[in-house]
Amino acid sequence: MTVSRKAVFFIRAYNDMDHFTPVIWQLATTTDLPISVVVRMGRAALEDYRMVFLRQFPTVTLHAIGDFIPEHDTDKGDSQPLLPRPSLLKRARRKLARWLNPQPPPEPRSRHEVDPDKVETMLDALFSGAQHGIVVFDWTTLSRFNVNFAQTVIESARRRGYANLSLPHGDSPY
């Protein structure tokens, strides 16, 4: 089915549910805009009372990040699902090298990186058939991974011609 437009909300924490639920509710009750909500903190969050409330609206669909990213990439919690995962052989080689030549470990860069290919695949699924779209995030500045995730999704959305919106964080002193 082709839809002319679609909105996708990314929720990274339970606090974001507090901020987004009224906005999503307003869109769901006053427009026919298809809305996808993607929670990044695990499938159990889909059973939160705010998500159960939003599920009643026919234009709202709820997803866990694991719906778009393979389960083996999402087994380490909130900040891990979109990271490139090294092969078993690479991990074994690293362990052997560390054992043979012990040194202080370097700062793990990949802990904060986001795999752009996985983001592209996720957006393909979320915006399937949509001609226009908007990606919505809660304002985030504290976690380097959350900032990188948002930037990667926004860059991909912009390349597709979609708009993006960062809603102000309601309890931030800034």
Image (cartoon, grey):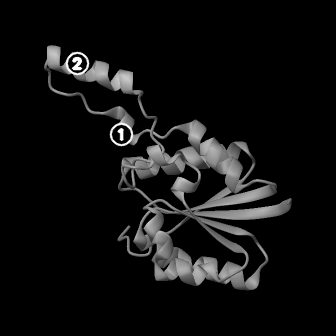
Q: Is residue 163 above or below residue 73?
A: below
Mark 2 surroundings within 10 Å by alpha-carbon count, few (fewer than 14), some (14 through 19), many (20 or more): few
Badge 2 amino acid: Leu
* Res 51 seen here: yes
Quadrant of the rendered structure where residue 60 is? bottom right
Tag 2 and tag 1, C-beta contact below 8 Å: no
Left/right of residue 72 with respect to residue 1 in the rendered view? left
Mark 1 surroundings within 10 Å by alpha-carbon count, few (fewer than 14), some (14 through 19), many (20 or more): some
Mark 2 lies on residue: 96
Quadrant of the rendered structure where residue 142 is? bottom left
Left/right of residue 156 with respect to residue 109 in the rendered view? right
Secondary structure beneath label 2:
helix
Residue in the image at 41% along x and 73% along y: 15
Q: Is residue 115 above or below residue 125?
A: above
Residue 153 percent location from the top left of the image: 58, 48
Residue in the image at 30% along x and 33% along y: 108
Q: Is residue 148 above or below residue 140?
A: above
Counting labels gives 2
Residue 116 percent location from the top left of the image: 56, 38
Mark 1 lies on residue: 111
Q: Alpha carbon of mark 2 to alpha carbon of mark 1: how far?
A: 21 Å
Left/right of residue 24 with respect to residue 112 in the rendered view? right
Badge 1 amino acid: Arg
Looking at the image, the residue that sits furthest to the top is 100
* Res 101 seen here: no
Q: Depth check: give the residue in front, 40 or 86.
A: 86
Residue in the image at 50% along x and 69% along y: 168
Q: Depth check: give the residue in front, 145 or 70.
A: 70
The quadrant of the picture occupied by the C terminus is bottom left
